[in-house]
Amino acid sequence: MKVSGARLSAMLLATWSTLSSAQSHIRCQNTIGGPCGDSSRPREMNCCDYGYCQPWNSGYYQCLDKPELCPNQETDIDYYGNDLQVIYGVQPDVCCDRCASTSGCAAYTFINENPDGRTACYLKTSTAGRVEKKGAVSAAYKDFVPPKCSATLWSGCGNSQRTSCCPDEAYCQPWNSGYYQCIDRPDKCPEQETDIDYYGNDLQTLYGLYPSDCCERCAATSGCAAYTFINENADGKTRCYLKSSTAGRREKKGAVSAAYKDFTNPTCTAKVGDSCGNEISGATCCPSGAYCQPWNPGYYQCIAEPEMCPSVQEGIDYKGDDLAVQYGLLPDGCCDACGADSRCTAFTFINKNDDGRSACYLKSGVGTPTSKAGAVSASRIIVIVDPPDFRKLRTLP
């Protein structure tokens, strides 16, 4: 029987995928040319001991040598906005070279897999706007020297489509979609991020404030680590969201976020088995190796993280990518159920439901992480094993 090279490649790739899913620990790929992950995994798990992890498509990431002029690649990261030029059909190393030869180019974002079948190389004036984006890889041009900013305090700095620089003592504040302005940085929150939201981890929402007031209220509020401020809202009132963390960082037009510079994490005195809050007050801290499990709206408890699903996200639903639902499990049993299904890379667990049964949603990926009270979600640890060398495959005679 004759087997085509393409068919043989597919058969071997399927075998490799099954093997990799069956493993129970993770390591970074240590061989240039070897696989280093896929889009279903948390970005920190797509790693290489040498070189960097290049996403070719959603199912296959590969370790490549770092371009000499752009040595610090960030896998699954997009430097959102600040585009100089888009170049199609080039390879990742060429994208770096094009940035190096383009006046004003500070960095680039490269995406190999796009709907039109062409690669896209986005040359950037800045590394600002750093957000997670599956399939993207971004890096700064190492020899870039930023031009002197000619903007002054109170001058315009762009709009929701494109922002420009502000002087060192200022940041670019979005007032509405059509007008952004350079204004003073608040002394206590000096590192603003324009068009960025620190999603989730809300302590309190305040209305009708100015940006500097939002920072001051964070500084005066126990447990406030950061804030997100949005000036333009449908009801005409500004919103100041006080946050317990800078986690959940994502792109959002019109938002500006910053950390409170003098915030210190309180020492967590909770132990496994202790209460850690409720739906009204929110989750409090748990010791290392544990997370805050919502059993019902009135009672959250610190319990040990499942061994094979250690990075549990509280109050988050991985919306979409559902494979199956299993009822009546405990959280660690949900992790085990995911491990028993070779297709499963993540899960969402909800203990309290209308029918009285817990629900374990097995997932093929992390879908769209969405805030949901009572939910916890996590990715399963998977090892990456070396696939066959497809370059050696030949069509059989």
Image (cartoon, helix red, strand yellow):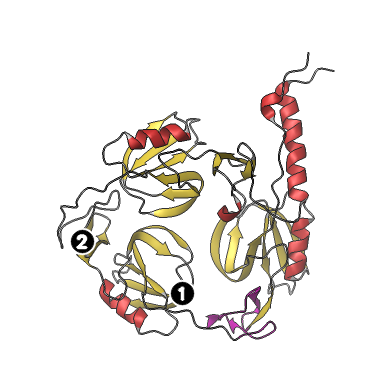
Q: Where is 361 relative to 127, above or below?
A: below
Residue 278: in magenta span: yes
Reading the image, the residue beneath label 2 is 182
- Using the image as rendered, state which of residue 195 and residue 36 is in the foreground: 36
Q: Quadrant of the N terminus?
A: top right
- Using the image as rendered, state which of residue 209 and residue 63 is in the foreground: 63
The stretch of residues the image draws in magenta is 270-299
Q: Residues within 10 Å of mark 2 (few under 14, many from 20)?
A: many
Labels in figure, total: 2
Q: Quadrant of the C terminus?
A: top right
Horizontal side of 314 relative to 242 (left or right) equals right
Q: Residues within 10 Å of mark 1 (few under 14, many from 20)?
A: some
CB under 8 Å between callouts 2 and 1? no
Question: What element does badge 2 sit on?
Answer: strand
Residue 202: mark: 1
Residue 305: in magenta span: no
Q: Where is 104 relative to 345, above or below?
A: above
Q: Where is 337 relative to 290, above or below?
A: above
Residue 225: x and y in percent read: 42, 75
